[in-house]
Image (cartoon, grey):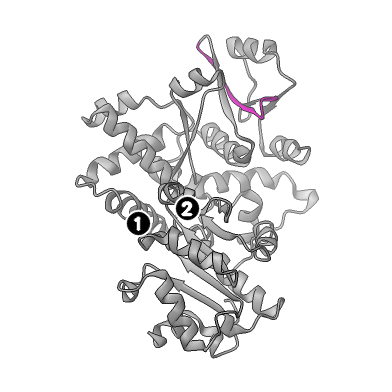
Amino acid sequence: MENIFYRYNPWWSETYSISSEIILRDHILNSLKIDIEIHDILFLTGLRRIGKTTLMKILIQYLIDEKKVNCKNIFYISLDDYHLNSLNILEIIEEYRKIQKLPFRNQIYVFLDEVTFKDDFEIQLKNLYDTGYVKIVASSSSASLLRSKKPYLTGRYKLVEILPLDFEEYLQFKNITILPEDNLLKQKYFEDYLNIGGIPEYVLHNDVAYLKEVVDDILRKDIVAQYDIKDISTVQNYFTLLMERSGKVVSINKIARILGISPDTSNRYLKMFEDSYLIYTVSRFGKTNETIKAAKKIYASDIGIRTFSTGVRDIGSLFENYVYLKLKMEDPKYLYINRNEIDFIIRNKILIEVKYGRDIEGKQKELFDNYNIKEKVVIKNIFELENFLEQR
């Protein structure tokens, strides 16, 4: 066990330096550096291969280099390692303390990757937290497993979802600098981004086989294996149908008929895809009963995965998907009245319609113009989106 721990924690025996290939996501890191100072358990969650482990390693380097934490007081482990199958989290931490001869009252920093692989992880984290001498940073690629365990950790955790790279981060990862006089190039680079998306490794190396592996991993590990589904082909077909319908209101019953499954099964599958962070759902704006009963719109969590699955069929739909991702933290809902739809209402006070390179027209324009709300915005390109976000 000692050899395994040392392999995961090279800073115990040598000068630690993160690979020069790693590119920092500063806006996330600045927030996490504040969170690392607070006793609460810090959960990093999000799509598989989105960079949660990398962020953990960068935080470890930050603790060593800037906070001057003793290297032996920092422990990282990936809990999906089969060598650890016979040990629970508390036993793993106890073994770590023994190896490093760390008294119980010594403050330690524990980084637990894929924490939901361990049964009863929530109770064990609660026990560790309650000792008062452990800062816990944990990751998971499953929203459902984290959500089901929240009651045990109430008041003891902060959840941070790591999203795919946005356009500005994409440019940074591609080492692209756009000078003010070349601002018109931004539109072309942005359309490239709509094809590639924001999975960090894929952005860096543009290896389609890697992106396929990411999708297959999520389908097999986070859906088929976790929910013990026997028919993987139905799951794969369901996913393709969701990607084709991204940006649209989804009919659970229609998908069920296409795939020859029951509406209940179709509804469960939709929830599984949402819990694996492959999609996000958006509710209809209105009274509570209308919101609950109405069908939801869906968006892909990563535009590159959507493009990989369906091809570039409608750049306007891809742009709307990107706008949603930029507005996600604003609790967006869609407006639907008399068979006309407006893309988003955020915080109950701003109405937003996304029209890539064109104007809003006809009955939709009538609804948009006449709807009684504080502010209205039509977003037609990346420049207008950036201006809107800067004014928020």
Find residue 337 and report its image quarter: top right
Predominant SS along the magenta part: strand
The local crowd at label 1, few if under 14, some if 14 to 19, many if 20 or more residues have their Cα within 10 Å, is some
Under tag 1, what secondary structure?
helix
Report the amino acid beneath label 2: Tyr
Q: Is residue 387 left or right of residue 12?
A: right
- Residue 282: x and y, percent? 51, 31
Highlighted range, magenta: 339-350
- Residue 25: x and y, percent? 64, 60
Report the amino acid beneath label 1: Asp
Q: Which of the two labelled residues, at mark 2 and mark 1, occupies the earlier sequence position?
A: 2
Q: Is residue 201 visible?
A: no
Q: Is residue 85 magenta?
A: no
Residue under numbered circle 2: 152
Instruction: Quarter of the image for the N terminus: give it.
Output: bottom left
Residue under numbered circle 1: 217
Q: Is residue 274 visible?
A: yes
Of residues 129 and 82, which is closer to you in this image?
Answer: 129
Q: Which residue is at a point 38% across and 38% down the rendered structure image? A: 271
Q: Is residue 200 left or right of residue 355?
A: left
Under tag 2, what secondary structure?
helix
The local crowd at label 2, few if under 14, some if 14 to 19, many if 20 or more residues have their Cα within 10 Å, is some
Q: Which mark is residue 183?
A: none
Of residues 206 and 345, which is closer to you in this image?
Answer: 345
Please tell me whether residue 105 is drawn above or below residue 306 in the rendered image.
Answer: below
